[in-house]
Amino acid sequence: MATDRYTYCIVGGGLAGASAAEGIREYDKSGSILLMGAETHLPYHRPPLSKTLWTGKKMVDDIFVHAREYYNDSGVTLALGVLATGIDPNRKSLTTDTGANYHYKKLLLATGGMPRKLPIPGADLEGICYFRYLDDYHRIREEATPGKSILVIGGGFIGSELAAALAMNKLDVTMIFPAPYLCDRVFPDYLGKALERLYTTRGIRMLKGDAPSSIKKRGGKFITLTRGGREIESDIVAVGIGIAPDEGLAKEAALKTGDGIIVNEYLQTSHPDIYAAGDNARFPYQALGQQMRVEHWDNALNQGKCAGRNMAEAREAYAYMPYFFSDLFEFGYEAVGEVTAALQTFADWEKENATGVIYYTKEGVVRGVMMCNVWEKVDAARELIRKREGASPDHLRGLIHS
């Protein structure tokens, strides 16, 4: 078996992997880099798949992180459509499904996450789309002609964005999710219920507090039976119920894992020459003082770049506070920190449930901030969270505003 040698091997052809290559080149202009990805596409930005590609604000050619020429000019060897199958940390070697064997000095695992599958009969029926990848967008886009019916399973980030995008493209959209309201892990109940009303006025049928129990095909249609006894007929079924961090290679290599690949402040795994970044990395979130795994674009971008720099001996602690964002019809938001409905919230509205700032607090200290239709205030929110000061409603009122 032929063996190729690289200074740096990056497993994962997404944003974190592409950003790592950039980070390496900031410190090492000549070390050889291999960027390997299971998809055949060049690394691309994932948010447009459920957002701007559907509104026409972006075209597919706009979503790639770099053109192919960038990788050629930067001395990055691409191995696309290639799946890494094993790591030997002692030999510093990497094997693939093509039979290739690579040796590395430093390795990055930027493999992201895999879509969670429905644990029900019919979950693997041909045609059901577990929406995550560019090929999934192409497939749904081809099928999603006006007037067709689609069942969107899931009421979190992907489900809510995809349902809104399809409704704007004149499909008959039904959503089903077990939670009591939309995006219940992030939104306080008053906001989730307000957005639910917005979705209903846009013609989306909401089946909350319910879940599929089986799916079958009948006469070219999908027939979804639910725990609540409903029967839903649709032309298309799209599933967005979250991802599971891809820990397979790390576990096989006996790296420390636990809801992700455990890394230190320099993004090193339990093996100092193997790093992890992006959706699969559980890292010390310094501003919050706790271990976290963050499944968002901004984290992949900045964490990937930091990992690349550290692979090239920069030795920089990852202290960045990633933000995340979403667009749901005319309601858009940016958020940073620990933004979870499990915390207490204080909403400072300019227009109730439409424009304003929600502060997420624990024991009187701001842990997270969501800015609803309030823009360019992420840095102010970061500064507030880093202070870790007590924050009463009187203090917070008007502190961040449009």
Image (spheres, helix red, strand yellow):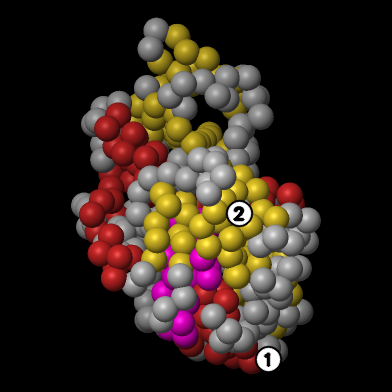
Q: Residue type at mark 1: give it.
A: Glu
Question: Disc 1 to disc 2, how far (Cα)?
Answer: 47 Å
Secondary structure under tag 1 reads loop
Quarter of the image with the N terminus in it: top right
Residue identified by numbered label 1: 389
Residue identified by numbered label 2: 94
Q: Residues within 10 Å of mark 1 (few under 14, many from 20)?
A: few
Query: In the rendered image, which quarter is residue 19 located in?
Result: bottom left
Q: Position of residue 371 (x, y in %)?
A: 46, 73
Query: In the rendered image, which quarter is residue 94 located in?
Result: bottom right
Q: Residues within 10 Å of mark 2 (few under 14, many from 20)?
A: many
What is the magenta range?
6-28
Q: Position of residue 323 (x, y in %)?
A: 50, 72
Task: Decide if residue 295 is on the left or right side of residue 69.
Answer: right
Quarter of the image with the C terminus in it: bottom left
Q: Nearer the viewer, residue 290 or 126?
A: 126
Q: Position of residue 85 (x, y in %)?
A: 61, 45
Number of marks: 2
Q: Which residue is found at the position 33% from the left and 65% from the top? A: 71
Residue 21 vertical position relative to residue 152 in the rendered view, above or below: below
Q: Earlier in the sequence, mark 1 or mark 2?
A: 2
Q: Nearer the viewer, residue 113 or 145?
A: 113
The answer to whether one can see residue 258 in this image is no
Q: Residue type at mark 2: give it.
A: Leu
Q: Nearer the viewer, residue 334 or 364?
A: 334
Q: Which residue is found at the position 45% from the left and 32% from the top? A: 129
Q: Which residue is found at the position 67% from the left and 71% from the top? A: 273
Q: Position of residue 63 (x, y in %)?
A: 30, 58
Residue 270 vertical position relative to residue 173 in the rendered view, above or below: below
Q: Nearer the viewer, residue 259 or 269?
A: 269
317 magenta-colored: no
Residue 113 vertical position relative to residue 340 in the rendered view, above or below: above
